[in-house]
Image (spheres, rainbow, N blue to C red):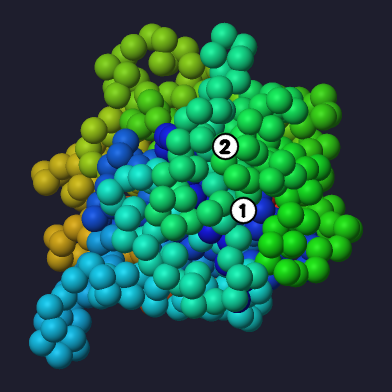
Amino acid sequence: MKFIIVTGGIISGLGKGITASSIGLLLQSLGYSVTAIKIDPYLNIDAGTMSPYEHGETYVLGDGGETDLDLGNYERFLNIELTKDHNITTGKIYANVLQKERNGEYLGKTVQVIPHIVDEIQEKIIKAAHLDVGFGTPDICIVELGGTIGDIETAPFVEAITRLCAKYDNHNFCFVHVSLILNMNGEPKSKPTQQSVKTLRSLGIVPNILVLRTENMLDANIIDKININCGVSKGNIICNINVPNIYFVPDLFRKQNICQKIGSILNIDIKSDYDLVDYYKILDHFSNKISTLKVGIAGKYVGLQDTYLSLIRAIEHASFYINTVVEIIWIDTEQIECGVENEWAKLKMCDRVIIPGGFGSRGIEGKILVAEYCRLNSIKILGICLGMQVMVVEYARSLGYKQATSREWNENGLHIIDMLPDQNGVMGGTMRLGNYKSIINDIILNQIYKQDFIVERHRHRYELTLNNANIFKNTDMILSVLDDKLNLIEIVRLENHPFYIGCQFHPEFKSKYNTPHPLFVSLLS
């Protein structure tokens, strides 16, 4: 197994995840099978109970793992299926060690960070690195260490990685450090990067490659200074300059021969011909002058786009497929609820609307108003998870069931949407999570999916049951997709409307840059 360890310095948010994903895509295009691990130093077991404002969206894996959003980057770029074991957190490590202690597995020894925590980290990395993610045992594992080098939270992980490195041959590890070159009145400043590398070296890691975020390509003088003060050869200093969007990063790295540099460190053959046909179709897309669609995202977390990162990517993937440009309009449903004219004006300029997933009652009546507006004005709309529930309740009210609601929003009223029977009130990891299979029984959905059943990823506690859906018998509401084992409705569609579809699952988690999700393609078409 060959490892590429990606670390970050100075500040968070430098794009370690995109760096890791881009390197993985390039290596994969050269014929290597690649997997990825994200280490998150927080004490939470996983990202499931965290607010989107804390850590961005919670990305759901096929096995139900609630993880960091960077695992979404890995899956989308590499077209692989990761597991919950590919997201290692401090919480998971300590929980496992403490359980072993309770089970007497340490034979009465004092349990300590060294060796017990550090050994557990190494075991988790090795286990995850060798898991089959769709093509047998991978050739290369990319490990992204979250946080910033020097943080106290990352110390056990750095120690574990240095000890793991010592167990292997020198050619089994390549260390890639992502840092920032500051621009001070037009003059690039490398001192923070020098300090970051110094800290990294003091912890036992010598970076092989520097990936530097910078506005423009660095000139020879600054490269010389970094080479002298950081001890990284000039040829292994990669400039990650400002580009229009993330899709340009792999090509930027390719032009700087990053895979050849990694190959020499890992002692693997790197051929010169990349298989990037699908990838370059995306870059061609951005060079064409094509029509623009305005797509509204109507939610309550519109102040932080990372909350809806997978949704944004899924919209982009569909836009590549149909060759159109999408302008996203952010609509605050709390403001819609309050009748703010500016928010209503933004809604009325949209060609398409999406009501995304979420939790709780805040902004719900605003979302219902958005659904009603799209239904009455024949605006194409897709409701996802909570968004589907909103559309179902709105339509029920239009039929005369004025008290229709969800138990999540209101304990009183007619609960069209109700809690699943297996929910016990415990917060972490107890929702209906991950992949579930459902049967399509609607010719329109058959045409959209081009198949008779679907496997989609879920994350919810409440749902529309077949029993509660009886009120829609002999109406325009079509129960298009059914989980026949549990009698749960997975997709609803409104007849006599150009596109009024709600899905209980999260289709955005299954979309890839080269295989867009059919619901998004159909919405934009």
Q: Nearer the viewer, residue 334 or 248?
A: 248
**In what element is the residue under mark 1?**
loop
Judge from the rendering whether residue 359 lies leftward or rightward of residue 485; answer left or right: left
Seen at 82% across and 24% down, the residue is 289
Q: Identify the image quadrant of the C terminus.
A: top right
Q: Nearer the viewer, residue 92 or 394?
A: 92
Eyeballing the image, is 408 above or below 10? Answer: below
Residue 144: percent from the left, percent from the top?
49, 55
The residue singled out by tag 2 in the image is 229
- Residue extending farthest front: 228
Eyeballing the image, is 105 above or below 40? Answer: below
**In what element is the residue under mark 2?**
helix
Residue 486: percent from the left, percent from the top?
34, 73
Q: Earlier in the sequence, mark 1 or mark 2?
A: 1
Q: Nearer the viewer, residue 286 or 235?
A: 235
Judge from the rendering whether residue 480 lies leftward or rightward of residue 43; answer left or right: right
The residue singled out by tag 1 in the image is 208
Give the spatial CA distance, label 1 vs label 2. 14 Å
**Residue 457 can be seen, yes or no:** no
Residue 362: percent from the left, percent from the top?
24, 33
Q: Residues within 10 Å of mark 1 (few under 14, many from 20)?
A: some
Residue 99: percent from the left, percent from the top?
18, 78
Seen at 51% across and 35% down, the residue is 194
Q: Nearer the viewer, residue 416 or 520?
A: 520
Q: Identify the image quadrant of the N terminus.
A: bottom right
Is there a contact, CB below 8 Å, between mark 1 and mark 2? no
Seen at 41% across and 10% down, the residue is 342
Judge from the rendering whether residue 186 lies leftward or rightward of residue 415; answer left or right: right
